[in-house]
Amino acid sequence: MIQKNCDSPRVKDILAKSLDLQVLNLAEVSALLSLEDRDLWAEVFDAARRVKEKVYGKRIVLFAPLYLSNECTNDCLYCGFRSGNRDARRKTLTVHEAVEEANLLSNRGYKRLLLVASEHPQLAGISYIEQVVHAIYKETDIRILHANTAPMSVDDFRRLKECRIGVYQCFQETYHIPTYRSMHSKGTKADYAWRLNVMDRAVEAGFEDVGMGVLLGLYDWRWEAGALIAHSRRLMSKYGFGPHTLSVPRLQPAQGSEMKDVHYRVSDEDLKKIVAIYRLALPYVGVVVSTREPAGLRDELLVTGASQISAGSKTSPSGYMKDGDTEQFEIGDTRSLEEVINRIVSLGLVPSLCTACYREGRSGESFRHLAEQETMKAFCQENAILSLKEYMEDCASGEAKDMLKKLLNEEIEKSANGLTEKFKLIEKGKRDVHI
């Protein structure tokens, strides 16, 4: 373990490397994972914030998950969807119901959704997902769909990519093999290697943007974070790019869960450390925090290194249209999209509903290079502002509208890139104005 003060120069060298937007090696990651000095941790948190702002500026991307199904053939002990949960109310949305939920979310201002499907080859396989994706793009104003689904074959991943999914997301849950096997004893998910190699198959099928993560609390977080970063580095070495996003889901209660005792509980302070380490180790990635976490902690993480958050989320099929059925896990932050936007602005940050990169080819290795050259933040800042102008015109009300007017007026004064003219286009009804 790093002893207090004696390795201060080493840690400062590591932070300087991160601030130069260089990917950390595993020895440097290990040094951060074992750091105990509280004063040095304050410097780590500050460096993570500065790295995020060098890459992305002050923008925070917003999205919502859309759960398609909770019918599952796996029996993951921690999950409300597990096949052994006899009290679960099962539901798979029809294509029409999925479109209804997407339309509702679009009308609230969302333009980016994450489709989440449990693992059931017959009910929620690739053919079903294709139909849902095509219908949402055709019948709603949603501009980009990402997908969190069961691992697929290369051929099925090609079909998923061809229907214009942006990011493919899948979590290993735990890299500790004995823990993995004890948590996933049944179903296709019991195959550790099939899940471990999922990103290779996705990239082979054409995905340049993939999202990864571990479920924090299943095993020691230092092991898990180190393994996830090692996995990311292997992808970078092999393909020239690694994960587009790293998520930090923390184990939460779920109806029907068999997790009675959590031996590796991750504290709020540890979660802040994990977010900071991900940001410093892989400066260009989007660090994603879900509504598993309480509002106050999520606000702290936004000024620590997180760059994307869900808002107003429901974790069950039909959750937005009605009460929904069995949830995957309990939600900690119940604020609406508008409330989260208000809070982000009050923190001096810029909410973003932008989806421009997916239509402008800024993905994979290209995205990484733009981020490392500190040019991505120029796109992020302007497109965030343009997306907020559209949100203000279409959805904002009351205090939110007043806050956004003030923010947008300030941004017009600072911009030398024709924001005023673009704002006029939006006021006249043009949508999806971006650079």
Image (cartoon, rainbow, N blue to C red):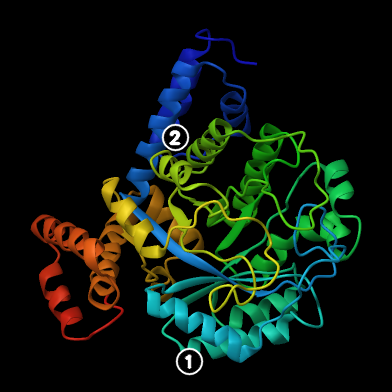
Residue 171, quarter of picture: bottom right
Indicate whether 370 appears above or below 126. Answer: above
- Is residue 375 in view from this perspective? no
Of residue 76 and residue 16, the one placed in the foreground of this image is 76
Look at label 2 and name its amino acid: Ser
Crowding near the residue tagged with mark 1, few <14, some 14–19, many ≥20 C-alpha atoms within 10 Å: few
Crowding near the residue tagged with mark 2, few <14, some 14–19, many ≥20 C-alpha atoms within 10 Å: many
Secondary structure under tag 1 reads helix
Q: Quadrant where the C terminus lies?
A: bottom left
Q: Nearer the viewer, mark 2 or mark 1?
A: 1
Residue 200 in the image: state x and y as whole percent.
70, 61
Callout 2 touching callout 1 (CB < 8 Å): no
Secondary structure under tag 2 reads helix
**Extreme residue in the top direction:** 6
- Residue indicated by mark 2: 18
Residue 356 in the image: state x and y as whole percent.
37, 71
Residue 230, quarter of picture: top right
Q: Is residue 127 left or right of residue 369?
A: right
Of residue 66 and residue 316, the one placed in the foreground of this image is 316
- Residue indicated by mark 1: 139
Q: Earlier in the sequence, mark 2 or mark 1?
A: 2
